[in-house]
Image: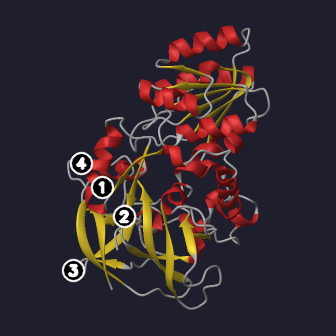
Amino acid sequence: MKTMAAVMREPGEKWWEIEELELDEPKAGEVRIKFMASGLCHSDDHVRTGDLPARLPIVGGHEGAGIVESVGPEVTRVKPGDRVVCSFIPACGSCPSCSTGRQYLCDEGRNALFGGLLDDTFRFHSKAGEDVGGMCVLGTFSQYAVVNQSSCVKLVEDIPFEVAALVGCGVPTGWGSAVYGGEVGAGDTVVVYGVGGVGIHAVQGARLAGATTVVAVDPLDSKLDFAKRLGATHTFTDAASAQDFVREHSWGRMADVAICTIDILSEEVVGQAVDIVGKAGKVVVTSVGKAEGKQIVVRGRTLTHYGLQVRGVLCGNTNPLFDIPRLVRLYRSGDLKLDEVITRRYRLDEVNQGYHDLLDGKNIRGVIVHEH
């Protein structure tokens, strides 16, 4: 069948190109999804800039929700007609990582930037017969895609597709950075650097985990105002002011957790995060770093003398099969704010405008609503 999709062909100055692609039928263990909505996550723009080196061409998008249209042999997790959200990290449930409660490290995620499915072949093809990958083995910037069933989590009926799409990546990544990565507890002081589409959910996660002081640091006042609405108790446009506040507010004990969710990780921000936590503090690194160079440079004496921890976190260290339904329940109860996070909706052919808006700081999260 044919599908319209946004394709990246070369990094740098090129942007997403809308193309008509051929889509193969699902093979064993695979399903075809009619995507209804896709989030515009910053990680896809990292493919454009080359900060995430991917095999090209590739269909963008890794936050998607839609309807299962057909299934191949041996599919047991979903059936035609099911509403699903796609996790950007597959969860097979049986590999060593999954079976020890670390689905965020599932072995089936190995092709995330290669774009082929588990047999290392492709389901998207150009009109000229060229193999086209799918971002995070998904490609949600397409009206339709064939994915492995391990990427699918069933949805309850009353969740809007635009909201569900975000629960595939940005929400669990931010929320889990606080709840699992930072192990935030009651009474903690938490500092979040960067409150965009991921950081805003780190703020929400810290609040829901019981932190009494949640400090948001971002250069944009508009994002800080939004962070206040969703749980930040204090906001600052610069790290130095945040550190002065935390030192005074905590009587010198400093923060318990610092979370780095800026757009591109930098040595400067990691250093600021290390400086703002106190004894036994945790620094959570969620941001994507550039492929070249080093972004984490810490004195060993600082770590050992104060018992500090610097932790890398992928997908918020969440388990998609358990945590996506959990986050949906928090949304349905009104504890997790997701409707408010969607700043603007776009058509597929407006994908580049969506990313211009994101880079200009106009959006917390943009969403593509697919037309069929």
Residue at x 42% of width, y 37% of height: 264
Q: How many marks?
A: 4
Can you see residue 108?
yes
Q: Which mark lies nearer to you, 2 or 4?
A: 2
Residue type, mark 4 in image: Gly
Residue 183 in view of the camera: no
Q: Which mark is residue 12?
A: 4
Whole-angstrom CA distance, mark 1 to mark 4, is 17 Å
What residue is shown with label 2? 141
Please tell me which of labels 1 and 3 falls first in the chain: 3
Query: Residue sitting at 58 percent across and 41 percent down?
Result: 201
| Residue 186 disc label | none
Residue at x 62%, y 19% (from the top left corner): 276
Secondary structure of the residue carrying tag 4 is: loop
Which of pointers 1 and 4 lies earlier in the amino acid sequence? 4
Q: Secondary structure at mark 1?
A: helix
Q: Earlier in the sequence, mark 2 or mark 4?
A: 4
Three-letter residue code for mark 1 = Val
Distance from the alpha carbon under mark 4 to that under mark 3:
24 Å
Answer whether labels 1 and 3 touch (C-beta < 8 Å).
no
Q: Which residue is mark 3?
A: 127
